[in-house]
Amino acid sequence: MKKILITGGAGFIGSHVVRRFVKNYPSYEIVNLDKLTYAGNLANLTDIENEANYRFVKEDITDANAMSELFKKENFDAVIHLAAESHVDRSITDPTAFVMTNVIGTVNLLNAAREHWKGQYDQKRFYHVSTDEVYGALGEEGMFTETTAYDPHSPYSASKASSDHFVRAYHDTYGMDCVISNCSNNYGSHHFPEKLIPLAINNIKNNKPVPVYGKGENVRDWLWVEDHARAIDVIFHQSKTGDTYNIGGHNEWKNIDLIHLLCEIMDEKLGREKGESAKLITYVTDRAGHDLRYAIDSTKLQKQLDWVPSLQFEEGLAKTVDWYLQNEAWLNNVTSGNYQSYYDKQYSEK
Ligand code: NAD
Ligand code: TYD
């Protein structure tokens, strides 16, 4: 019997982690804490919302008192912390929101755990979910390992790097049981359509231009979101205290090649003539400080904890497209409201 606080569980990756834990561990009590920002959506969890071992709490991790009160009341056994501002482009427009949630919010959770778990640190676990972007950008060669020095470039990655340092500091200073994983770019269902893959799917579907930053030569290493959730499960249950794991799919794609593959899949699924969707590709002004390449070496996770990615990218991307085409109501719902004004502002400047 475990009571686990999962933060950010209404977001993209968090909803897959919540679903996995609720379904696979009926004896655990899963408390999903989320502020429900533009990226948080309870419709991501309708299939499990009535399960007996699941509860939702609407809270803001930047509220230190609320975090302390919650830890006092609930006596959690563990935290899996995913709540974050997660979009690099938004971090370029408004860095302070990233400092508040990603740095201060993480420190608030660490403080609440430190205070209320005193004397029991060996029985409690704080698992922090982070990104490969903390390592900075690679050239044509090499991969990030767990010992690569941190070198963040965007306000987003700088805030995540800072939060990672705080988590390690609480382990080293107070002896708390902290674990961190750094994952590459995720893709799959329930991904908010401001990020590249769901944005492109939505635009291709609606015959709108598909914006490719710069020359489309930047490389990302894509992982199926359910493989990330499974890695988190394995690391949460099996990792040593204070340990770090890189998670990635050995699946590097240049943005422009990925978009071409997506266009081919969409042509087929939408019954369009071959090459029709690719006509929508539009090169736009590059992102400021755009990291050239990310690539994760996940050998440690594969060897020590026997985790391997389950899906080939082509198969995963086709499944992702199917999900978006079959879940039109979800897509229409998240693209109503403020989405259009964000989109117009972001892309009119490019
Ligand atoms: P997301 O933006 O889809 O979801 C973030 C969730 O956090 C949302 O539900 C949002 O409402 C919630 N949230 C934001 N601010 C909050 C606050 N102040 N208090 C409480 N809740 C708040 O993000 P995601 O893509 O699911 O990423 C989840 C985590 O995984 C993040 O920590 C991110 O840095 C990390 N990560 C993401 C990727 C990726 O490819 N998306 C890759 C590696 C690591
Ligand atoms: P994104 O999905 O924002 O993830 P991240 O910046 O965390 O890697 O972007 C993935 C890649 O796609 C990145 O190199 C930026 C690029 N990109 C575009 O070319 N056009 C777009 O409209 C977006 C949102 C991203």
Image (tube, rainbow, N blue to C red):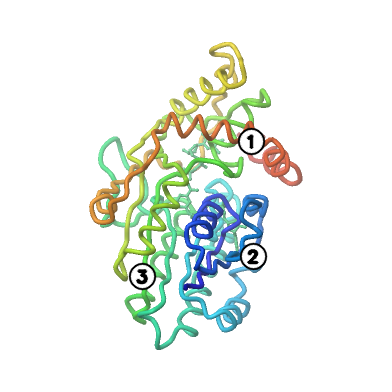
- Looking at the image, tell me whether mark 1 or mark 3 is earlier in sequence order: 3
Under 8 Å from ligand 1: the CB of mark 2?
no
Q: Amino acid at mark 2?
A: Phe
Between residues 207 and 228, which one lies in front from this camera angle? 228
Of circles 2 and 1, the one toward us is: 2
Q: Is residue 64 above or below residue 344?
A: below
The secondary structure type at the circle numbered 2 is: strand
Q: Is residue 85 above or below residue 30?
A: above
The residue beneath circle 1 is: 347
The secondary structure type at the circle numbered 1 is: helix
Under 8 Å from ligand 2: the CB of mark 1?
yes
Contact flag, marks 2 and 1 (Cβ < 8 Å): no
Cα–Cα gap, marks 2 and 1: 35 Å
The secondary structure type at the circle numbered 3 is: helix
Of circles 2 and 3, the one toward us is: 2
The residue beneath circle 2 is: 56
Q: Is residue 227 above or below residue 29?
A: above
- Looking at the image, tell me whether mark 2 or mark 1 is earlier in sequence order: 2
Count neighbours of disc 1 (C-alpha within 10 A) and say few if under 14, some if 14 to 19, many if 20 or more: few
Q: Amino acid at mark 1?
A: Tyr
Question: What's the mark number on residue 77?
Answer: none
**Picture quarter with ligand 1:** bottom right
